[in-house]
Image (spheres, rainbow, N blue to C red):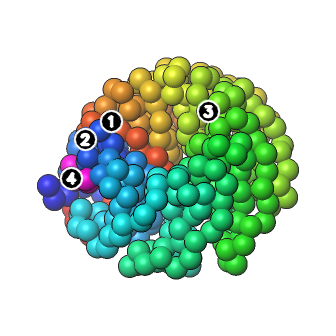
Amino acid sequence: MAAAALPAAADTGFVTCQNGDALSVLDLVTGEERARWSVPGKPAGVAVVPDGDVFVVSPGSKQVRRYSTAGEVLAETRLDGGPIGVAVDPARGRIFVSDWYNARLWVLSSETLETLATLPADAAPAGLAVSPDGAWLAAAERDADAVRIYHTETLTVARVVGVGTRPFGLGFAPDGRLFVGNVGSNDVTVLDAPLGEVLATLPVGDRPYGVGFAAGRAFVTNQYASTVTVFDLGDLSALATIDVGEYPEGIAATGDGHVAVANWFDNSLSLIDARTLEVTATYETCDGPRAFGAFILPGNPPGVLP
């Protein structure tokens, strides 16, 4: 199904649905599903960039695809291994993909998806994130209980930092601190990534998965608790625990002061007002939404005309 017209300034969610071999394109103002793309191979990882490209990783078929916002496949490749997480380095025209099975990361051309390099990692690398200034790449190494920090310019390892048990999802706050969700120890490690220093360990709900940031706050999805834990970014104090759908996973900030949460078992997306900390809407998605990565494109996407 081709993408339909989107209202001006509407944020758009590109929600990967692993069970349904699909991706829901959601208007985050109205909740309307503007398109549903067929994405074979159990898609999970996703990264949307400002120019409108949408990168999707399908672990089941070992494929990475580059889409336009209209759903056209612009490039694709098959990676032998266990591709799962993806992050974009737009300044250098590259994307990074984690290899769950082979303790490495792939570096791909964001244009052609040609493999440019591979980077060493430890056991079961999963979530990836690039720092706001573009200087650092972080990889959560789940079975090593560690995070590996790379220089994005040189693609060399800068630091390996021990965190909690089984880190999976992670994200850089706007100020550059790195927040890591540890699914085995039910906490979040806060790091100074360039220095490799642990700044804090924050208890959260059962099985924390993803981290998002909005309105001076950090939001952490707790899979088994069906909740989101909220922290103040200033003093790291816990502010609230918010009930969302069943088995929340991917989380990302919108451009209008909300965070969107993909609820895998409910086939839904919850919108939370980042200031009032209330759930303001729940939208239907395709089957098994994971949205593992940066899945929101602010404003009217290029190539999708009003």
Residue type, mark 1 in image: Gly
Q: Quadrant of the C terminus?
A: bottom left
Q: Which amino acid, by three-letter code, is at mark 2? A: Gly
Distance between the alpha carbons at the discs numbered 2 and 1: 6 Å
Mark before the other along the chain sequence, 4 or 2: 2
Looking at the rendering, which quadrant does residue 17 occupy?
top left
Task: Report the residue marked by disc 1.
Answer: 288
Would residue 44 be found to the left or right of residue 157 on screen?
left
Disc 3 and disc 2: Cα gap in Å? 25 Å
Q: Residues within 10 Å of mark 4 (few under 14, many from 20)?
A: some
In the image, 269: left or right of 284?
Answer: right
Q: Residues within 10 Å of mark 3 (few under 14, many from 20)?
A: many
Q: Is residue 154 above or below residue 157?
A: below
Q: What is the CA distance from the residue labelled 1 to the residue labelled 3? A: 19 Å
* Residue under label 4: 38
Residue tagged 3: 183
Residue 281 location (% of width, % of height): 36, 30
Dot 3 or dot 2: first in sequence order is 2
Residue sitting at x 66%, y 65%: 120
Q: Is residue 49 above or below residue 13?
A: below
Verify CB contact (< 8 Å) between mark 1 and mark 3: no
Which secondary structure lies at badge 1? loop
Q: From the image, tell me which residue sits under label 2.
A: 20
- The single residue placed furthest to the left in the displayed view is 1
Give coordinates of residue 20: x percent, y percent. Answer: 25, 41
Image point (52%, 79%), residue name: 116
Could you classify mark 2 by the number of other residues whose Cα lies within 10 Å: few (under 14), some (14-19), or many (20 or more)?
some
Task: Decide which of tag 3 and tag 4 comes sooner along the chain.
Answer: 4
The magenta-colored residue range is 36-40
